[in-house]
């Protein structure tokens, strides 16, 4: 599943000797570095989660070597040299480790119940991983359970398992409180009603005994389309268009082919808009236009910054 020459995948965490933990955000290296975003900082022996603004400030002030400006994709993110990585946290290994021992807290008890339910309804345990706070044993009572699923086919099989379990009431839909919490975490440009309508039909999240869990897809090597082209931002654009290909809607980045001559490819680097639209649906998209410097072809990016202010994808209902 992992390329020996570059074994880092989205949803992995990488740790540095300075006491920093980053979430990996790309399948490919950038000038020999792992593209990532700072998530946790070790303060007085305690791991503390850090938000986007705090992460950027901390690195700029104290660890500027981890700030990265990519000429290739005309974007700023964090990046770590492989030689600076002291520990590589892999979700698939963590899932097996937690499953094979007694649960140590309430969230792990629910996790031990969740995986057999998913497997009973058709998910395959060997394709699953455990990421988020549980990947580094930093969960608390209010934490979510964040699962990875390796491979597009396995991911959709797991979505079908969630649908079947919901139908049998072995799992629960997100209640309003959990949906509001999900909305507040994601922020974004949609109203709560718009957000909830889109989320409820994705079948990539549900609840077990009051705890939310979600699944995120990580592509296998033969499913990844590495892009080494150079892009330049051309300003913002808002369009209404029709989805003509949705088979990569749950990828990272999510990729929709649309009926638009200027920007036929819509990509989202923001998890909110993964799985947002289906084949044949009319959508409104607001994002940043990027031009391929070699071919002149343009694409529309939602999530050109981590906050994605003013950027969105929504189905026109």
Image (cartoon, rainbow, N blue to C red):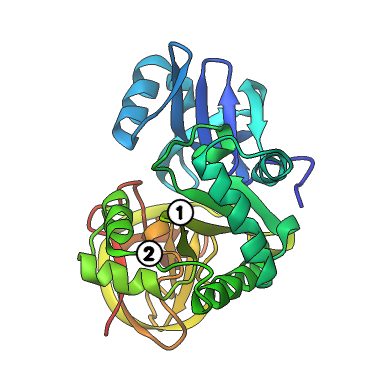
138 displayed left or right of 12: left
How would you rate the neighbour count of disc 1 (Cα within 10 Å): few for under 14, some for 14-19, many for 20 or more?
many
Looking at the rendered image, the disc whose residue lies closer to the viewer, 2 or 1, is 2
Q: Nearer the viewer, residue 168 or 239?
A: 168
Tell me if residue 34 can be seen.
no
Residue at left 35%, top 72%?
198
Q: Position of residue 7 (x, y in %)?
A: 72, 41
Separation (CA) of disc 2 from disc 1: 39 Å
Q: Nearer the viewer, residue 125 or 12?
A: 125
Q: Residue furthest right?
A: 4
27 displayed left or right of 267: right
Residue at which label 2 appears: 174
How would you rate the neighbour count of disc 2 (Cα within 10 Å): few for under 14, some for 14-19, many for 20 or more?
many
Residue at left 45%, top 32%?
38
Residue 87, quarter of the rendered image: top right
Q: Residue furthest top?
A: 44
Q: Position of residue 301 (x, y in %)?
A: 38, 60
Element class at badge 2: loop
Tell me if residue 223 can be seen.
yes
Q: Nearer the viewer, residue 126 or 54?
A: 126
Give the mark nearest the N terminus, 2 or 1. Answer: 2
Q: Position of residue 39 (x, y in %)?
A: 44, 33
Residue at left 51%, top 44%?
107
Counting every numbered tag in the picture gives: 2
Residue at which label 1 appears: 231
Element class at badge 1: strand
The quarter of the image holding the C terminus is bottom left
- In the picture shown, does residue 29 fall above or below 194? above
The dot on residue 255 is none
Q: Position of residue 86 (x, y in %)?
A: 65, 21
Residue 274, quarter of the rendered image: bottom left
Q: Nearer the viewer, residue 317 or 263?
A: 317
């Amino acid at each position: 599943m992992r390329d020996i020459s570059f074994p880092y995948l989205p949803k992995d965490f990488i740790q540095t000797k300075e006491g920093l933990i980053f979430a990996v955000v790309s399948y490919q290296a950038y000038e020999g570095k792992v593209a990532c975003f700072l998530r946790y900082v070790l303060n007085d022996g305690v791991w503390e989660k850090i938000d986007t603004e705090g992460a950027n400030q901390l690195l700029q002030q104290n660890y500027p070597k981890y700030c990265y400006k990519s000429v290739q994709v005309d974007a700023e993110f964090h990046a770590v040299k492989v030689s600076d990585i002291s520990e590589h946290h892999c979700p698939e290994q963590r899932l097996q480790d937690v499953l094979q021992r007694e649960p140590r807290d309430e969230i792990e008890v629910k996790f031990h119940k969740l995986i057999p339910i998913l497997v009973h309804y058709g998910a395959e345990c060997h394709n699953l991983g455990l990421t988020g706070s549980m990947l580094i044993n930093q969960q608390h009572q209010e934490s979510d359970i964040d699962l990875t699923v390796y491979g597009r086919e396995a991911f959709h099989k797991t979505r079908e398992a969630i649908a079947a379990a919901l139908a049998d009431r072995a799992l629960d839909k997100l209640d309003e409180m959990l949906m509001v919490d999900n909305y507040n975490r994601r922020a974004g440009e949609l109203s709560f009603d718009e957000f909830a309508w889109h989320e409820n039909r994705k079948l990539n999240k549900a609840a077990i005994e009051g705890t939310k869990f979600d699944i995120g897809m990580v592509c296998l090597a033969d499913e990844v389309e590495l892009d080494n082209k150079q892009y330049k931002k051309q300003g913002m654009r808002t369009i209404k268009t029709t989805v003509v290909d949705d088979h990569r809607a749950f990828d990272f980045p999510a990729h929709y082919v649309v009926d638009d001559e200027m920007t036929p490819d819509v990509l989202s680097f923001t998890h909110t808009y993964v799985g947002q639209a289906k084949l044949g649906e009319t959508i409104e998209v607001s994002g940043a236009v990027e031009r391929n410097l070699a071919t002149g072809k343009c694409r529309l990016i939602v999530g050109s910054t981590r906050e994605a202010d003013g950027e969105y994808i929504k189905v026109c209902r």
